[in-house]
Image (cartoon, rainbow, N blue to C red):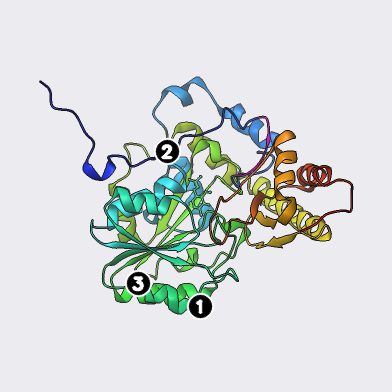
Amino acid sequence: VTPPIRPRPHLEGFERPGQGWPSRHDVLRLDMNEAVPGVDPDFFALVVDQLSPAVLSAYPEVDPLYDALVTSLGVSREQLVLTSGSDAGIRQVVEAFCEPGTAMVITDPTYGMYPVYAHLYGLGCVRVPFSASFSIATEDLCAAIGPDTSIVCIANPNGAIGVAHDVAQIEAVIERAAAHGALVLLDEAHIDFGEDVWASRVDELGNVVIVRTFSKAAGLAGLRLGYVLSNERVREGVYAVKPVVEVNAIAALAGRLALEHPDFRRRHVEQTREGRGWLAAQLEERGYEVRERSANFLLVRFGADHPQVMSALAERGILVREHGDHPLLGPYARVTAGPIDSMRHMVDAVDSAVSPAGSRSH
Ligand SMILES: Cc1ncc(COP(=O)(O)O)c(C=O)c1O
């Protein structure tokens, strides 16, 4: 009799959610902080124009994308590793640098995959919560870093709560982590909406690694493209655990075109900032609390109107993110920002939910 085949013990019963929806292609996607409403049709045409049967059939050619990144960032090729989304970059960093039995320090809330990777690679996970005022004390973050810590993951700006950490706080974390031989992973998925401080310093800082993505401002979440930027020694570890070819061929092509035509990204960021400000003003005018504006989304508290607003959005095919009973985010809906035209649909749906007009209660 063949003995039952089992995964390794720490993976037994470890649940990973499925996609959970039939398709999000034909709805207004304000739930996952992708680019809204999607890539510019002119950019799409550029990509399609360069697609060919060979692009699909040959193993991916990644050199042109590395070259474009080197030019656009002003760093050396030996500081970069392409990854399948920044998500794979995070995983590769943990795999390369964190011994089982050590600890990962994260904030709460933050990007949901950090604790998953901590579990997969046998790390403990220490969570430092944001306070009710949506801030985190530098002393609390530093106090969580100790001799067991192998990595501190800071999403800056934070993709769950929208907060940007100030330079002094990150400096303190880097110093404290260095004293314990720990790496600091700065997750800059949302950096186009934040302040680009660390990329130019990563070479001089021995224990910092940055992950970035083409999923947000560049609007290419479907292609799964990101990169890791670090000093050459850290890069060696991340490169060692890469798959046979780092990224797929269409991602390599579209990523290069995105870097060669940065105006598409700039325009998207501008329009998103504008739409974010417009939406915030509209919702505040209607008496709703709106929080955090450092990334491509807003947190909105609809209060007593929450259930009606959620049904009206669902009816109109507008997706937003809810947070269940999370102690801090529970009362807020997270709404991805986009150009004013897209935000108008959101406001119309909110207005339709609350009737008769002007009789809202919170
Ligand atoms: C902070 C942060 N990091 C990483 C990711 C993963 O992005 P991707 O794997 O698409 O690059 C996200 C996605 O929402 C995020 O918000």
* Mark 3 lies on residue: 145
Q: Residue at x 21, y 33 (%)?
A: 6
For disc 1, the marked residue is: 168
Where residue 204 sits in the image (x, y, percent)? 39, 70
Dot 3: what SS? loop
Q: How many marks?
A: 3
Query: How dense is the environment of label 2, judged by Cα within 10 Å: few (below 14), some, or many (20 and up)?
Result: many
User: Which one is in front, 104 or 85?
Assistant: 104
Asked whether residue 30 is drawn in magenta, I would say: yes
Q: CA distance from mark 1 to mark 2?
A: 35 Å
Of tags 2 and 3, which is closer to the observer? 3
Instruction: Report the amino acid beneath label 2.
Output: Val
Q: Nearer the viewer, residue 44 or 165?
A: 165
Return the disc, 2 or 3, that comes first in the chain's sequence.
3
Horizontal side of residue 239 vs 198, given as left or right: left
Secondary structure beneath disc 1? Answer: helix
Q: Quadrant of the C terminus?
A: bottom right
In the drawing, what numbered circle is on residue 247? 2
